Every structure is written in C-alpha cells, then in structure tokens.
Amino acid sequence: MGQRDSGTKFRGIGTLIANFRKEMLVNGFRSINSNKGRNLMNNLLRGGLAGAAAYKLGGGIVSTILIFILVFWLLGKC
C-alpha cells in the first residue's frame, strides 16, 4: 500500500533537476526566456487570484473548491 508501482508517473526532485539540466544543455539560455516561464507565472497569478476569490466567496470546503476551479478556468479564457 505504501509502495509505488514502477509504472506510475511520479517525478521526484531529482528527475526535475535532471530534465532541467538536459534542457539547458540542448537549448541553452533560450529555454529560460521561452513561453514556459511566462506560462508558469501566468498560472501562478491565475492560481493566486482564483484562491483569493475562492477564499472571499466560498462558504464551505466544497463551494470554495468549486469557486476556485471556476475562477481559474475563467481566468484561463481571458
């Protein structure tokens, strides 16, 4: 129960660092200035705004989660 299957897509910090190093070797510093970083910042901003809206408008745990998902989705459409 506590063990993971080898077929699962669990990515640890070591895998993330290895992928980052491999991408830096292939693309150099162009990969830092690509749209991936911009999308990450946009998603963080979307998540923060959706979290603030859900915190203010949500009454219970279910409504807070639903409001977060709705606002996050709506901000993605803008």
Image (cartoon, helix red, strand yellow):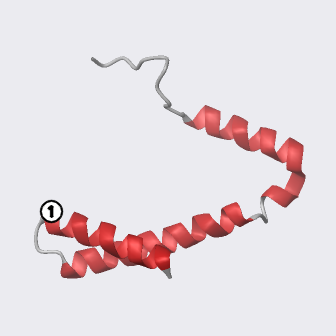
As drawn, is 68 to the left or to the right of 64? right
User: Which of the 4 image quarters holds residue 54?
Assistant: bottom left
Local packing at callout 1 (Cα closer than 10 Å; few below 14, some 14-19, many 20+) is few
Q: Secondary structure at mark 1?
A: helix
> Relative to 70, is 60 on the left or the right?
left
Q: Nearer the viewer, residue 67 or 49?
A: 67
- In the rendered image of this protein, does residue 2 appear above or below residue 39? above
Q: Quadrant of residue 37?
A: bottom right
The residue under label 1 is: 62
- Image coordinates for residue 20, horizontal then vertical, percent: 73, 44
Q: Position of residue 56 (x, y in %)?
A: 22, 81
Q: Residue at x 62, y 67 (%)?
A: 39
Location of residue 6 in the rendering, given as x and y in whole percent from the top left corner:
49, 17
Residue drawn at the location 42% of the way across and 17% of the way down: 5
Q: Residue at x 25, y 72 (%)?
A: 67
* Residue 31 placement, left or right of 18: right
Establish if 12 lies above or below 35: above
State the residue at coordinates (50%, 68%).
44
Judge left or right: residue 18 versus residue 60: right
Tell me the amino acid under the disc marked 1: Val
Q: Residue furthest front?
A: 77
Q: Where is residue 16? Give x, y as percent.
A: 63, 39
> Where the N terminus falls, by quadrant?
top left
Q: Is residue 26 above or below residue 3?
A: below
